[in-house]
Image (cartoon, rainbow, N blue to C red):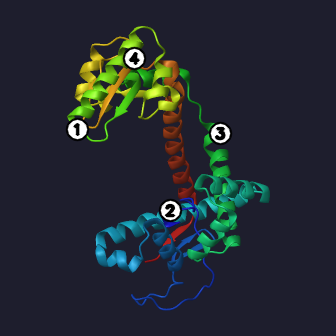
Amino acid sequence: MRGSRIFPLLVYLLMSGFFCQVSISAEICNRVVAIVNSEVITLHELNAKIRELTGLEPTDLRIQDEKTYLETRRKTLDLLIDEKIALEKIRELGIEASPEEVDGAIERIKEANRLTHEDLVSGLEREGVNYETYRESIKSDLERRDLLNFEVKSRIIIREEKIREYYEQHKDEFRSEEKVHLAAILLRQEDPSNQDETRFLLGKAREIVARLKSGEDFGELARKFSQGPGAEEGGDLGFFKTSQLDPELIEIIKKMSAGDISEPIVRPSSIQIIRLEEEEEKGLKPFGEVRDAIYGILYQEEVNKMYSSWTKKLRESAYMKIIF
């Protein structure tokens, strides 16, 4: 489960037990490393968060690279301070996620990761976490989300002219590649070194091309003769970017128009007949097609900007003391 972490980034688990064994570095795990208003952050919390974010033991990280360890420790402590400040604001505003909201969030996590309830519980146990503790972590995350919506997202307005301006200034990001929609009939050769088999298949392919040019349906003949992908769908292969195709096929398609059928194409282990269904030329995607994507980009930029400003103001009004 570690590869697809269930735990949201901003969720931390306050492990039970205030005192613990002396670590390798001889520091006591419950030592207070920061005070935030009426809350404290212990070394135990800090080390647990570093493990969660990096997947490494803090002592191992320190041995590997002292500079990286110190930078990681600083950033992790900043994150924990922001969490403590956010927790006080949540309490102040009376924000509380209901049991039904928590259940719904857990169901969405299970669906996204294709987990049964038993899979989730056993995975948590492997991580050393019981299910009730996990529910509490999800509850905290939902409350932080609601706080963010209340304090930041509800104030964001993205004007239409700003979306249009972004489109005009970033047109290169919204250019589509040339695409072709292909269908194919493929005759597979069992022994590529057998010249007699090659001649037989080539003759068969020419007969199929002749039948197609006389007006027979491509889909019907593909279902009857093709031994390649899409045979059951009448040989339909779907759309391809021209950059995905090999140079030989690109040269053949360049000479074709929509509806044209190629002559038999001899491959190392097969013979193909290609039909060009349609082409989409390279060009700029229309504004209407990309508007929502641009809105999402601008909205996230504003969220990040306002969240940074909001947390900065909260920090300025909070009492903080870092003890290292």
Q: Identify the secondary structure beneath mark 1.
A: loop
**Label 4 is placed on what type of residue?**
Glu
Residue matched to label 1: 194
Crowding at mark 4 (Cα within 10 Å: few <14, some 14-19, many 20+): some
Q: Nearer the viewer, mark 4 or mark 1?
A: 1
Mark 3 is on which residue type?
Ser
Position above or below: 58 against 207: below
- Mark 2, residue position: 79
- Residue 165 place in picture, x, y as percent: 44, 22
Mark 3 highlights which residue?
A: 154
- The disc labelled 1 sits on which kind of residue? Asn
> 264 or 101, which lies in front?
264
Instruction: Identify the mark nearer the N-term, 3 or 2.
Output: 2
Q: Reading the chain from its start, which is encountered first: label 2 or label 1?
A: 2
- Report which residue position mark 4 lands on: 279
Of marks 3 and 1, which one's residue comes earlier in the chain? 3
Mark 1: give few (<14), some (14-19) or many (20+) Cα within 10 Å. Answer: few
State which tag comes first along the sequence, 2 or 4: 2
Identify which residue is drawn at 46% across, 76% down: 323
* Tags 4 and 1 touching, CB below 8 Å: no
